[in-house]
Amino acid sequence: MKAKLFAIIAVIMIAVSTQGFGQIENIYLTNDSSMVMNRIYAGTLSGTFFSMDSLYNTNFVNVRLGAQATYKMNKTFSFSIWSFYQVDKQAFYATSLNLKIAPTKQWNIQIGKMATLATEQRPLPVTSSGQFETWTQARGANGALGIKSSYTFDNNIGFGAGFFEREKQPEYQADLIVKKFRITGIYTKYSDQFAFVSSLSLDRFYTTIVWKQNEVLANTSCITLGKEKDIEIYSDQGIDLKNNDYIRGEVGILKNFSSQWVKGKIGSGYDIKTNMLKFYLFVHL
């Protein structure tokens, strides 16, 4: 199966390389532009980890294929769908399908199996950021079946509310956006626990905090340097609140690259918790 996926990625790269990246984003599928293939995604991420305490080393590699499309029926109604398939130690996949109703430019309602309000603070799975998602971001809420609504004022202040099904029990979310800052509160009935996810995204800095009652407190932050914004210095930290234990601690540096053929990252980090050096290579369309 892995060999087949690598072969598929190779075919996609050959097919689009002569025209650059534009050919695999925003491809109009109808003459009236009502159906759009927002993106076709293919990427491979690998890492090699070396212990500072012994000669032990380990590694991983995963491959992800995905796509996203939108059908806009009119100014008010549209459908959006995405899906991806990833091979890691085990193969897994995810899908999303939702109906969006936009009575005005500022107000929208969405119904379906989709990203919850809190999930929206995680990167979209069919993008490079989604495959290279940090440990902290992955602690955030997964998508779910439900309904959500958001309203944004002209001064970039907005709020939202959502009702979702999680483990056959209701989950409630409330959302507040103040320009570049966002915070989402969560109450999940099946676990009878609260949580929140907050993020701040500036031109050269972003940070995300995830707190789950009696479970975890996590933070990831990244500073972008260089004229080309091609250097990233990151931190990814986590605490187990149940056992009061430091369970995640990684800092490192990444170099972004881009060519006619591929884009990606190469870099290294240090895992404070395990005392390991980590090296990453990430290549995607």
Image (spheres, rainbow, N blue to C red):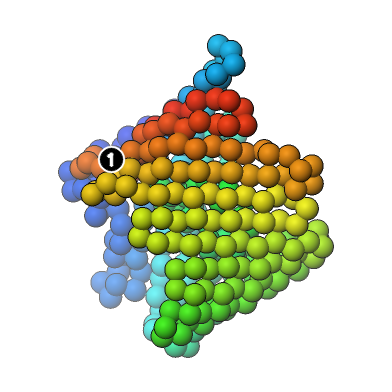
Residue 8: % across, % down: 38, 37
Quarter location, residue 34: bottom left
Residue drawn at 44 percent across, 73 percent down: 179
- Give the residue at mark 1: 257
Q: Residue furthest bottom?
A: 103
10 Å crowding of disc 1: few (<14), some (14-19), many (20+): some
Local SS, label 1:
strand
Residue 193: % across, % down: 78, 61
135 relative position to 163: left or right: left
Q: Residue furthest top?
A: 55
Residue type (three-letter) at the residue carrying disc 1: Phe
Residue drawn at 55 percent across, 11 percent down: 55
Residue drawn at 58 percent across, 38 percent down: 249
Quarter location, residue 174: bottom right
Residue 239: % across, % down: 68, 44
- Asked if one can make out residue 76 in the rendered structure from this viewpoint, the answer is no
**Image quadrant for the C terminus?**
top left
Counting labels gives: 1
